[in-house]
Amino acid sequence: MEITSDPKVKKVFNEYPTSVKQQLLHLRTLVVETASKIEGLKKLEETLKWGEPSYLTKYGSTIRMDWKEKTPEEYAMYFSCSSSLVETFKIIYKDTFTFRGKRAIIFQLNDTIPETALKHCIALALTYHKVKHLPFLGA
């Protein structure tokens, strides 16, 4: 799998406070690991959308991640609110994750991330346009 990365993404990661940077780089690693295991996925684009590290594939829905100063103890992975991704995640992982609206999975800085579940969510997002017609996105 080919990863194309906008050099500005690295600059954004480097501007986060150290503890936040580590957590967001961990999310990035989970996105890249998940993408590399999706059959037929040939390219992952790492770019900035709204100034936030974002990940796109040909048949996927954009995944973004960020930390905000106004909520310093949490960070988030964002999904398109016009998709059915977060609504589906709420059904499948209602007792696993904390959600914000139809847009985000929220993590506390000291959380241990349930990686298997999050990788499943990431995979569904990265293949969204292939699975959006399936009940529960084929999960």
Image: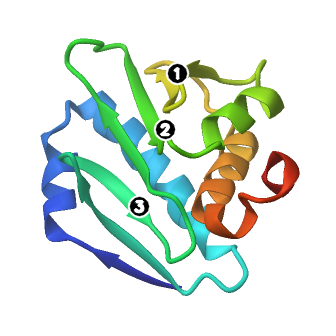
Tell me, yes or no, if residue 129 can be seen here: yes
Q: Nearer the viewer, residue 110 or 106?
A: 106
Image location (x, y in percent) of residue 37: 69, 73
Residue wearing tag 1: 101
Q: Nearer the viewer, residue 111 or 128?
A: 128
Assess disc 2: are there few (<14), some (14-19) or many (≥20) residues with their C-alpha within 10 Å of its C-alpha. few
Residue drawn at x 49%, y 32% is 103
Q: Choose the circle earlier in sequence order: 3 or 2.
A: 3
What kind of residue is marked 2?
Cys
Residue drawn at x 48%, y 46% is 27
What kind of residue is marked 3?
Tyr
What kind of residue is marked 1?
Gly
Residue 134 sits in quarter: bottom right
Residue 41 sits in quarter: bottom right
Please tell me whether residue 19 is drawn above or below residue 115 in the rendered image: above
Q: Nearer the viewer, residue 124 or 113?
A: 124
Tell me, yes or no, if residue 139 can be seen here: no
Q: Is residue 3 left or right of residue 82?
A: left
Image location (x, y in percent) of residue 38: 69, 74
- Element at badge 3? strand
> Label 3, label 2: how many angstroms apart (C-alpha)?
15 Å
Residue wearing tag 2: 81
Residue wearing tag 3: 55
> Label 1, label 2: how many angstroms apart (C-alpha)?
8 Å
Please tell me whether residue 38 is drawn above or below residue 110 in the rendered image: below
Q: Which mark is residue 48?
A: none
